[in-house]
Image (cartoon, coloured by chain):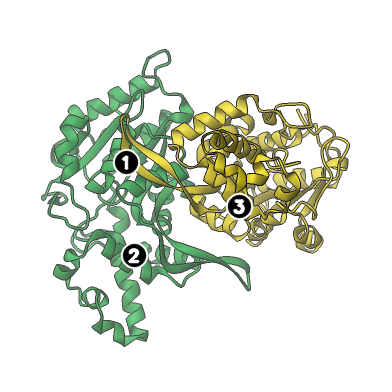
Chain colours: A green, B yellow
Amino acid sequence: MDPLPSWTDGFAKAAILDFVSRATREGSSDFIPVPERIAVFDNDGTLWVEQPLLVQLYFALDRLTAFARRDPALRERQPYKAFLERDFKTIAGFSRREAFEFVYTTHAGFTTKEFAEVAASWLADARHPTLNRLFTECVYQPQLELLDFLRSRGFKPFVVTGGGIEFVRCIAEKLYGIPPEQVVGSSNKTRLESGPGGPALFKLPELRSFDDRDEKVVNIELHIGRRPRLAFGNSDGDLRMLQYTSGGHGARLCLLLHHDDAQREFAYDREFRLSPLDEALRMAPASGFVVVSIKSDWKTVFA
Amino acid sequence: MDPLPSWTDGFAKAAILDFVSRATREGSSDFIPVPERIAVFDNDGTLWVEQPLLVQLYFALDRLTAFARRDPALRERQPYKAFLERDFKTIAGFSRREAFEFVYTTHAGFTTKEFAEVAASWLADARHPTLNRLFTECVYQPQLELLDFLRSRGFKPFVVTGGGIEFVRCIAEKLYGIPPEQVVGSSNKTRLESGPGGPALFKLPELRSFDDRDEKVVNIELHIGRRPRLAFGNSDGDLRMLQYTSGGHGARLCLLLHHDDAQREFAYDREFRLSPLDEALRMAPASGFVVVSIKSDWKTVFA
């Protein structure tokens, strides 16, 4: 039975099947012991959609709208003004870091438990603006098959995301089958305080880690403590993670998703300022990264 | 068959067996779904010996001796002087944080990979000063049985240690069967740099997190993302972790190891300044923490 039915028979699919076969064949020089079968996946644009804006930005926007009802002065201050006015041209001009700092600010003040409840409740019925489906249905079917296939072969998949760790944990278990302890992401600092229900962690409006570029590698080491054997990303923010993955000994596979299907999803790369794909794409051939084309490598995009 | 043969039949053992039985009995109001069966264990003094000094301090001492050969001026500066002269009275007067900061300083300058190699090589033949065995043989047999028993019932054990995350990862897989991604600990900041073998992480002489007291809870949330159901510690540094664990709904078990066996191991609690057991012991009865006495609850101490 084909473990990857939504993948077109082609170079990318063959590279995946070949890698997994070598990695799991006992006696092969490429054999990887089960505990070392660590696979890391970026989230936005790799496991689910990130256009026209990152899903978490829509969430932050709705949070901000609620805040502005209590504090109307926010309507006159950037970056809040642009977000409140849905001024997407200005928003698209923010750097990835600026956008995320805005996100973290709007996420502070909750306990981690409250935050997870608010986010889960928002995700339950928030819809993508153009794809005519819930955000939680904007997950890529071929990637779900790949995750299942890897797990069936003893791999342990982690999400390593620039998105907020608590936000992504709200979806990772249900949508990807990835438990919270296998989600690595950006995070606010937190502080332990005692409340009526015992000690609770409060999210502070201060960034602990922006899990992007070099920091993805730093956090992989902090959370996982092993160099991954497979990495899948879709932007320059994932380049270091792919280089780090490919830099070790033994069998390794790095993949780069290229959004080139305006018909079924979106077509973009270097011009998406929040998360460009430029340098990584240019380096792919010499680095041995397998470029996966949504248009030609995926029969189905969404479930 | 008794899953805990090194445990004396008594209150502590009965509490463990009862908790696991309730937590895994489907239909029981205390049933815990498998993904939520998270157990956290302190390391020093809980899984292996921490007297007369923390094992990692002996390692740091040997590192420092090597440094002092290249830089003799260290012999005149505190805290290095005390460590180099094996002035244990002065060392015992350092606070836990001071001692750990000394440790991190001596651990910097390596890549994480080099550090793991140096530490593993040291651990291969470093011996405990009085127990007449390797440090790696100073692991508590009853705890190994408990870890195996919990795993066999679907629990996922994590080490949550004040010790350095990379140092403890060197022993956790081999000694406890706990993989690196299930070790949470103190850590230096790291920086990604490109070297001859591709990108590598360098340990900086700057603390990222001292995983003690409140910070244990902060890091449990960061790394695990779920409130544990079982926590086992042995000092006031573990108190917040135990309180956080016991604070949630449903079945929970918190245990506190009391070193009261000078014959077979060591007898100490509040007077061990590096890691005192005082407040947690006083709070145990009212908090429902089960106090485990090495003297009366363990038939065997070491394997």
Image-based side of A19 in relation to B172, left or right? left
Does residue B85 lie above or below A31 as drawn? below
Q: Secondary structure at mark 1?
A: helix
Identify the chain of the residue marked 2, using the numbered disc in the image: A
Secondary structure category for the residue under label 3: loop
Locate the N terminus of chain A by quadrant: top left
Residue with the mark numbered 3: B228
Taking the image as shown, residue A78 lies to the left or right of residue B66, namely left
Residue A31 x, y percent position in the rendering: 40, 19
Residue position marked by numbered label 2 in the rendering: A125
What residue sits right under mark 1 in the picture?
A: A241
Tell me the quarter of the picture where residue A86 sits: bottom left
Tag 1: amino acid: Met
**Answer yes or no: do the residues labelled 2 and 1 have beta carbons within 8 Å?**
no
Q: Amino acid at mark 3?
A: Pro
Residue B259, given in percent of the width and then of the height, sits at 81, 45
Q: Is residue B195 left or right of residue B291?
A: left
- Tag of residue B278: none
Residue at the top extreme, as displayed:
A27
The residue mark sitting in front, 3 or 1, is: 1
Do the numbered discs 3 and 1 sit on residues whose CB atoms are within 8 Å? no
Q: Nearer the viewer, residue B146 or B131?
A: B131
Q: Give the Cα distance between marks 2 and 1.
A: 33 Å
